[in-house]
Image (tube, rainbow, N blue to C red):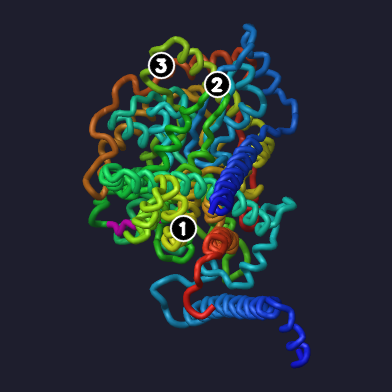
């Protein structure tokens, strides 16, 4: 009996050791995911941004956490570029970029204190704000909406008015308001005139002709269509195969990716200073990616994105098109466009008859203070902050985005 | 083997029985491996059959090559480079991710099993604990995982003790443990209650201490309950890991890979299937690990049915 008892003890110890090994193995491998590999390519913007660094000595960088909406991809290139090119370090910040996931809501993470800053679409963030998440838009990076409604060229759908009686896909979860606003503006009742279909996050529904027009982002899902092979010809689909409705051009575009900060903490002088530094360095990152699209796409891939090279570059280029030109300055919230977003958000009803928000958001829901100061500082450093001469590159998508 | 050889072998005490048993086990193993292969082959034939019929007769679901790629497309896709110019193939990336998830699931499993066992012992020892704690143990499993996962990650982001930084990987492990502890604690509790009153009275007549009672009577008699509970726990740990990875986007594991590859489904439909098979292999590996534990724990128990 004693021997059995002893062997049991030994077994328990064995289990404990295995457990410790498993734990340490997992702990060890997480550290390797943090990569900061970036090829050194000195460019004009880089030199200019580092000369914009504060004169004061930086002994211990302030830790800052940024919550993204999704996995690492070119949609967030500016922040990764600011990290890898040392713009954050120049501002004495140590930025940790937290990737998103299926159930991660960035503005909630921010409001709960899990991150110092978060990226979010304006309508969704305002909806969270109305439910009590006190957050403030401190830099409106994307000036244009990237939402499209894509249909087959032979479908005859060229404007939201043509949606009548058709199967129209949308993603739901607050991503559907531009679609409904487009219909409402065209005089259609989204609830009765159109067959609304909840759409997957891939484009198979459209390719298999299960839906007539699918919601798509210029920088992602639209590219997925152009990376797919037409089984009839064996060639990739081309833009000529599709009709594209751009909600930006329909006058119902809503502000999308913006940097949000905690409203309560903005009363604190220390957090104000951090916000200023973070906004300045992040915008410098976006300026860098405007001028170095290929390098920024490579930085994203080096940071662990699994997207193919041509898809990544396409995304970088399309994202640049949504940001530039920024006539009022990069990151500046234009009151008219903000008002358009708020107007669509308060007036457009979804199928349940609910609007995104019920009342105009409070005045502290956005501020241009930090973006304006950042623009002044970056301009003083010799950078072009409006991108008035911006010309997109041309990207050829390959099969599967490779 | 000739008869004379067999007689010769039998003359060595103990040996022939063992070798015959080993031979039988080998044969049985080969047979079950054969059946498994046949099953896989049948599944592949069924898949292709559904595709072939689907191209003629309209099914309520889509059978096109993008939704249901051919078996050979999937096999071919597994050996393509993960990205253009990268030296790892899709299969290697999937295997690495499955291994990573297995490590997290194992960590969660070990934590969950330890916590579950401890809870069961406490609840068995003190009746008031069982009355007070068991409802909470059961209630803990009614919280939907997709509500729990972001919460745990959110709390984890703010959590650090001295030099120790909580990482999202630990959150995933925590969720795996959270799912794994439940079947074990309930199963172990039943097992610990299993000894008959006669056995308990016998132990009491020996003036056995509670600890002796636990280690010499209750644990051994709980094994028939413990083993199935361990199997369920292991499965829960794997499911918890994959779902938590999908839900919170933690990098490195198979859950994240499934999401990443599913975005490329229009261009490379085979990729996501390879990742799904990786998840299946992950589950099988976990099941195999538990079977090893099972064989070890039950080695002294009488085998049921024809051995």
The percent position of residue B31, horizontal first and vertical second, equals 61, 80
Q: Is residue A333 left or right of residue A280?
A: left
Judge depth for marks 2 and 1 and give the one in front.
1
Magenta segment's dominant SS is: strand
Residue A182 visible here? no
Whether tag 2 and tag 1 are in contact, CB under 8 A, the answer is no
Q: Residue A92 location in percent, x, y? A: 60, 16
* Disc 3, SS: helix
The answer to whether A117 is drawn above or below residue B48 in the figure is above
> In the image, are marks 1 and 3 on the same chain?
no
Kindly identify which numbered label has been placed on residue A266. Answer: 3
| Picture disc at residue A63 | 2
Residue at 51 percent across and 29 percent down: it is A66
A400 relative position to A135: left or right: right
Q: Residue at x 38, y 33 (%)?
A: A108
Residue identified by numbered label 1: B220
- Subunit of label 1: B
Single out the mark in the foreground, 1 or 3. Answer: 1
Q: Nearer the viewer, residue A151 or A270?
A: A270
Residue B253 at x, y = what percent? 57, 49
Cβ–Cβ below 8 Å for labels 1 and 3?
no
- Is B123 above or below relative to A38? below
Tell me how far mark 2 sits from mark 1, CA to CA: 52 Å
Q: Earlier in the sequence, mark 3 or mark 2?
A: 2
Residue that appears at 29% across and 26% down: A361
């Amino acid at each position: 009996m004693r021997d059995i008892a002893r062997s049991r003890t030994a077994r328990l110890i064995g289990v404990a050791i295995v457990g410790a090994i498993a734990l340490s193995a997992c702990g060890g491998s997480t550290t390797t995911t943090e990569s900061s590999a970036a090829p050194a390519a000195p460019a004009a913007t880089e030199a200019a941004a580092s000369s914009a660094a504060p004169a004061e000595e930086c002994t211990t960088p302030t830790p800052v956490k940024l919550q993204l909406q999704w996995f690492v991809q070119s949609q967030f290139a500016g922040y990764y570029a600011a990290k890898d090119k040392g713009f954050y370090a120049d501002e004495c910040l140590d930025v940790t970029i937290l990737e998103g996931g299926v159930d991660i809501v960035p503005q909630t993470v921010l409001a709960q204190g899990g991150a110092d800053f978060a990226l979010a679409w304006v309508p969704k963030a305002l909806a969270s704000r109305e439910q009590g998440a006190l957050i403030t838009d401190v830099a409106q990076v994307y000036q244009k909406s990237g939402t499209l409604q894509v249909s087959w060229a032979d479908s005859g759908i060229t404007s939201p008015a043509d949606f009548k009686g058709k199967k129209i896909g949308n993603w739901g979860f607050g991503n559907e308001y531009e679609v409904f606003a487009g219909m409402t503006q065209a005089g259609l009742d989204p609830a009765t005139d159109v067959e609304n279909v909840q759409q997957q996050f891939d484009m198979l529904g459209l390719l298999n002709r299960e839906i007539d027009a699918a919601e798509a982002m210029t920088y992602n899902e639209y590219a997925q269509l152009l990376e797919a092979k037409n089984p009839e010809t064996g060639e990739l689909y081309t833009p000529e195969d599709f009709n594209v409705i751009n909600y930006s051009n329909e006058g119902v575009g809503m502000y999308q990716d913006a940097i949000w900060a905690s409203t309560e903490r903005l009363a604190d002088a220390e957090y104000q200073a951090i916000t200023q530094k973070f906004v300045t360095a992040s915008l410098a990152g976006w300026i860098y990616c405007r001028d170095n699209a290929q390098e920024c796409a490579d930085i994203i891939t080096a940071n662990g994105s699994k997207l193919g090279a041509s898809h990544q570059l396409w995304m970088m280029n399309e994202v640049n098109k949504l940001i530039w030109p920024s006539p009022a300055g990069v990151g500046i919230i234009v009151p008219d466009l903000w008002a358009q977003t708020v107007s669509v958000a308060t007036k457009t009803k979804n199928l349940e008859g609910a609007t995104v928000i019920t009342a105009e958001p409070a005045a502290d829901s956005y501020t241009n203070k930090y973006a304006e100061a950042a623009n002044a500082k970056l301009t003083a450093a010799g950078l072009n902050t409006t991108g008035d001469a911006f010309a997109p590159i041309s990207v050829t998508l390959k099969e599967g985005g490779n | 083997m000739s008869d004379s050889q067999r007689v010769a072998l039998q003359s060595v005490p103990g040996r022939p029985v063992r070798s015959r048993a080993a031979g039988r086990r080998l044969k049985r193993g080969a047979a079950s491996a054969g059946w498994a292969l046949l099953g896989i082959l049948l599944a592949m034939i069924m898949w292709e059959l559904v595709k072939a019929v689907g191209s003629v007769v309209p099914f309520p679901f889509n059978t096109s090559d993008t939704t249901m790629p051919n078996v050979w497309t999937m096999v071919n896709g597994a050996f393509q480079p993960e990205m253009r110019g990268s030296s790892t193939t899709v299969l290697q990336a999937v295997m690495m991710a499955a291994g990573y998830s297995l490590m997290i699931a194992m960590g969660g499993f070990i934590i969950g099993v330890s916590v579950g066992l401890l809870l069961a012992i406490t609840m068995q020892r003190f009746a008031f604990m069982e009355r007070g704690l068991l409802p909470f143990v059961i209630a803990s499993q009614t919280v939907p995982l997709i509500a729990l996962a972001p919460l745990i990650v959110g709390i984890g982001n703010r959590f650090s003790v001295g030099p120790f930084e909580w990482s999202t990987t630990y959150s995933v492990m925590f969720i795996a443990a959270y799912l794994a502890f439940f079947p074990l604690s309930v199963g172990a509790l039943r097992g610990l209650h299993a000894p008959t009153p006669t056995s308990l009275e016998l132990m009491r007549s020996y003036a056995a201490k509670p600890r002796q009672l636990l280690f010499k009577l209750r644990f051994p008699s709980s094994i028939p309950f413990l083993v199935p509970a361990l199997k369920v726990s292991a499965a829960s740990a794997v499911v918890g890991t994959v779902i938590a990875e999908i839900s919170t986007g933690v990098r490195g594991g198979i859950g994240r890979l499934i999401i990443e590859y599913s975005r490329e489904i229009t261009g490379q439909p085979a990729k996501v299937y390879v990742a799904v098979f990786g998840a299946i292999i992950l589950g099988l590996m976990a099941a195999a690990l538990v079977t090893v534990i099972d064989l070890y724990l039950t080695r002294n128990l009488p085998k049921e049915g024809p051995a």
